[in-house]
Amino acid sequence: MRRHQGMRIAALPLFVAMALIVGCSTSPLAPEQAAGPNRGLTTDSAGSNAGLLTSTTKVISASIDGLLGGAIKNGDWTVKIPAGAFSGIGVITVTVPDASVRSCDLKIFPSLLNSFRVPVTLSCRSATTADAQTDVMMWWDPSAKEWKVIPSTANLTTLSRDAPLSHFSTYQCGKAGW
């Protein structure tokens, strides 16, 4: 009995540290975090890098127990973590560099959790049924320095485009080649 209670007390600093890491970023009262030049990329009609965005970035983080699963939402983007996706507790961060550019950056801390046993679903809300049906989900391939279309499906119930992910990275949703 005393050993179990001692383990609880020993785990308390870890819990407090995790709470401080996450902070109030998921609170509706959290301040928006202004960004200097951020890493969000825009592309021209040929799909090449058109430059860096300069706007207000919205960052949302949450602690998720990978054995239980959970969800985190930032604007039009939702990340659904199914039970058993990873072992342990990860701090998931969804960064939307600019709400007018349908792009998000997904991270997990610690980074060793960034390989999922069960695919995580990334959803991007669409404006219309036609958009949900015709948009594609893309992944930024840093080694090739280009956007690559990834498998995704239209979800007409939620009016979104959904993609199963095996890892977190930078993603966009929209028309292919824009």
Image (cartoon, rainbow, N blue to C red):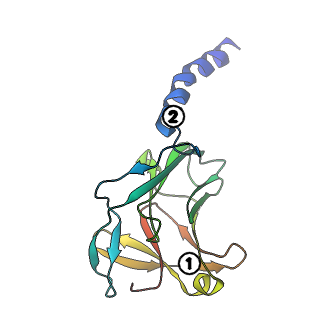
Q: 101 or 39, which lies in front?
A: 101
Give the image location of residue 22, x and y in percent.
50, 39
Residue 144 visible in the shown view: no
Residue 131 percent across, percent down from the top left: 58, 84
Q: What secondary structure is marked by label 1?
A: loop
Task: Confirm whether residue 176 shows in the render.
Answer: yes
Quadrant of the image occupied by residue 125: bottom right
The dot on residue 152 is: 1
Tally of marks: 2
Q: Residue at x 57, y 23 (%)?
A: 12
Q: Is residue 85 above or below residue 175?
A: above
Q: Which is more toward the observer, 89 or 134?
A: 134
Mark 2: which amino acid? Met
- In the image, residue 82 sits, relative to residue 21, either above or below, namely below
Q: Quadrant of the C terminus?
A: bottom left
Residue at 56 percent across and 51 percent down: it is: 86
Give amino acid for label 1: Ser
Q: Which mark is residue 18?
A: 2
- Of the numbered discs 2 and 1, the one sitting upstream in the chain is 2
- Residues under numbered marks 2 and 1 in contact, where contact means CB atoms less than 8 Å apart: no
x and y percent of residue 93 in the render? 48, 51
Crowd tier of the residue under label 1, counting other residues whose Cα lies within 10 Å: few below 14, some 14–19, many 20 or above: some
What's the CA distance linking mark 2 and mark 1?
33 Å
Please identify the residue farthest to the top as the structure is shown.
2
Q: Is residue 98 left or right of residue 152?
A: left
Q: Secondary structure at mark 2?
A: helix
Up the image or down, 20 lies above or below 74; here it is: above
